[in-house]
Structure formats: C-alpha cells, structure tokens
Image (spheres, rainbow, N blue to C red):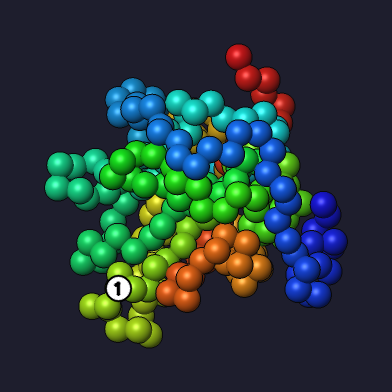
Amino acid sequence: MSTLTRLALGAMGKLRPKPPTGDTSVNVVLPPPEKHGGLALLDSLALRASSRDFSPEPIPLTMLSTLLWAAWGVNRADGHRTAPTAINAQEIDLYVAMTSGAYLYDATAHALHLAAASDVRGVTGYQDFVDSAPLDLVFVADHSRMKLVPAAQRESYASAAAGAMAQNVYLYCASKGLATVIRAWIDRAALGQAMGLGNDQQVLLAQTVGRPRSVTPP
C-alpha cells in the first residue's frame, strides 16, 4: 500500500489491520538469546545506519530472540534490563508486529504473548514498506508504571527509554547485517485500537527490521 493511500485512509479513520497469515500461536517460547560474540561495539557503531529497503523474508526465530533480548531483555539477576529507565520504572512495553499477529514481548519469561490476532504491520506507520518488511517493533509507554514521575514529564521519560532500546536494536542489526529504521510518523489512535491498547498506554515509536532486500538469506 502506498504512503498516499495510507494517509487517505488515516484521514478517513479507516486505516485497519489485515487478517493474519501463518501460525498465530497464543504464546511463543523464544530460544535462548546469544549473549556473546558478534561484532565489537565500535565496529557496530561504524556500521549503524537507517535503511528503508527490506526483503520480505522472515527473520529466523533464533535471530528474533536475540534481537528482542538486545532491545529490552533481562541482563542481570535482579531483573534490570539492557536499556535504562528512570527509577527503574520499566514503563515500556515492546510489541512485535508480524504477519501472524501482534505480540507482546515478555522479557522475564523471554517469550511472546499474542496481543492482537491480526496483521497490524500496515498500521504501524505511513511509509510504504511497513507491511512488506517481515517485522515492525512498536514501543508503547504504560503511564500507570510512572506514578512517581510528574504527569507532564512522563512522555519525555518514556521516549528517552524507547530511544535507548531503539539504539540497541540498531547496534544488533549492524552486528548481524540486518536493515532497520526507527519511525515516528504513525497514526497512533489507529494503531492503539488495532493492538487493543488501554487508556494508560501510549504508542511512542515504531521500528522496522528485516534483511536488506539485496541480500539473500543462507
């Protein structure tokens, strides 16, 4: 679907998800993430870039597992994460939009839980590639977890946390030769409705991930 078509549907309040395809499992247990190896940090920083040209080829579950752990996984015995949040509020929910549905990443169990049995990729942004790439991440702030933060500052706090998570995704993608781009041009009301979000939840950003179109998977 083109950007202009998406804009027109959004203006009419008719931007909608598609029916899912593939195996829409209620719960997906992820394999253990890789926590060692990959490119050195400075090499990954040198390769970090945004790309908008994606192959539709699905990302293997083993790679998705490490991608999600890099973004927002538990990396210490006390439950702290790979990205910081103020006063350790852990207010960000990370959703994974795929052809089979939209899933919430459960970092403690390292698993995915079905949030919406529909293909919401086309609602995650106005860009023309969002529903052809295999995976769109959606960063959602839960304001109910930020009661110690003044209400006027909660969006800023949550956006800083989401930005740190997005950079983790960028660095992992650079290390593994994946393409990615962070996006903020979103019909947030339509996406929130498609994902069944509550009143305390706020869509902040989305991030598309996939193989570069010119690269054929092994």
Q: Is residue 61 above or below residue 72?
A: above
Asked which quadrant contains residue 211, the reply is: top right
Q: Is residue 58 above or below residue 146?
A: above
- Tell me if mark 1 has few (under 14), some (14-19) or many (20+) residues whose alpha carbon lies within 10 angstroms of its own: many
Q: Is residue 80 above or below residue 174?
A: below
User: Does dot 1 land on a helix, a strand or a loop?
Assistant: loop
In percent of the image, x 70 and y 32: which residue is there? 55
Q: Position of residue 173 (x, y in %)?
A: 50, 36
Which of the pair 212/39 is nearer the observer?
A: 212
Q: Is residue 23 left or right of residue 150?
A: right
Q: Amino acid at mark 1?
A: Met
In percent of the image, x 30 and y 60: which residue is there? 90
- In the orientation shown, which residue stands out farthest toward the left? 78
Asked whether residue 199 is in view, the answer is: yes
Q: Position of residue 148 (x, y in %)?
A: 23, 78
Asked whether residue 130 is in view, the answer is: no
The quadrant of the image that shows the C terminus is top right
Residue ID for mark 1: 146
In percent of the image, x 66 and y 68: which residue is there? 190
- In the orientation shown, which residue stands out farthest toward the top? 218
Q: Position of residue 40 (x, y in %)?
A: 35, 29
Q: Is residue 185 above or below residue 41?
A: below
Tally the marks: 1
In percent of the image, x 56 and y 49: which residue is there? 102
Which of the pair 38/9 is nearer the observer?
A: 9
Q: Position of residue 142 (x, y in %)?
A: 39, 68
